[in-house]
Image: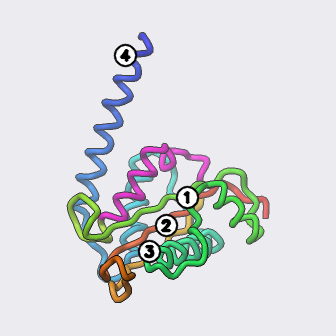
Amino acid sequence: MPRGDVMKAVRRVAVSVTAIVFSLISVAPVAAADPTTHTKAEVDAARGQAGCPPFQADPVLTDVSQRTAHEVDDYVRHAARNLPTTLDTDLLKALRETGYNTSNARLLNGYGDYRTGGAGDNEAKAIKGAVLQGWGFEVLSDCTLTKYGISAINGGGSEGWPSTAPRTYSVVVVVLAGPSGR
């Protein structure tokens, strides 16, 4: 098959997968009040569709995901002193600082507020963003990633900045990693 035809087929599959993910997330039941539980359910469902074994929760990865979510939260509220961890290279450095030695780790971020497009509330939009990032970068279908840590924050909207009105928002952070040589 010529390369051009292969690329067209790959694009069609990507569009189909994106449509399926959107439809599954938009009709999924919302967890009561815990955004982390809702995020975990959506990531686990997407992982199951990928044909890989389920992720295993890891307390170190959960701590790193919580720290990263709070960094993003501080950034959104204009209270941060530094930029949040957003790149996989930043993630590997943060993991090494905790003693978690792996060369295979990925960071998925999601954010939702009234300006974020799509259906659903802020939490649903943030989760969709993280899951779609996982599909888009073929992270959820990477079976060498076996462990995860998840954190989510729903911002109350009490803070603002002189140039922005206070608003509610949601932040989702998922840290995925392969085996660690702790």
State the separation of the CA atoms marked 4 and 2.
Answer: 36 Å
Q: Is there CB contact under 8 Å for labels 1 and 2? A: yes
Q: Which residue is mark 1?
A: 107
State the separation of the CA atoms marked 4 and 1.
Answer: 32 Å
SS at mark 4? helix
SS at mark 3? helix
Query: Residue at image x 56%, y 71%?
Result: 68
State the separation of the CA atoms marked 3 and 1.
Answer: 18 Å
Given the image, on which type of amino acid does mark 1 rest?
Answer: Leu
Percent coordinates x, y for residue 53 in the rendering: 51, 52
Given the image, on which type of amino acid does mark 4 rest?
Answer: Asp
Given the image, on which type of amino acid does mark 3 rest?
Answer: Val
Q: Is residue 55 left or right of residue 103?
A: left
Q: Badge 2: how crowded within 10 Å, few (<14), some, or many (20+)?
A: many
SS at mark 1? strand
Q: Which mark is residue 76?
A: 3
Nearer to me, 118 or 132: 118
Given the image, on which type of amino acid does mark 2 rest?
Answer: Val
Percent coordinates x, y for residue 57 in the rendering: 56, 68
Q: Which residue is mark 4?
A: 5
Q: Which residues are magenta?
A: 125-145
Query: Residue at image x 31%, y 50%?
Result: 21
Q: Which residue is mark 2?
A: 173
How is the protein colored in the picture?
A: rainbow
Q: Quadrant of residue 165?
A: bottom left
Residue 137 shown in magenta: yes
SS at mark 2? strand
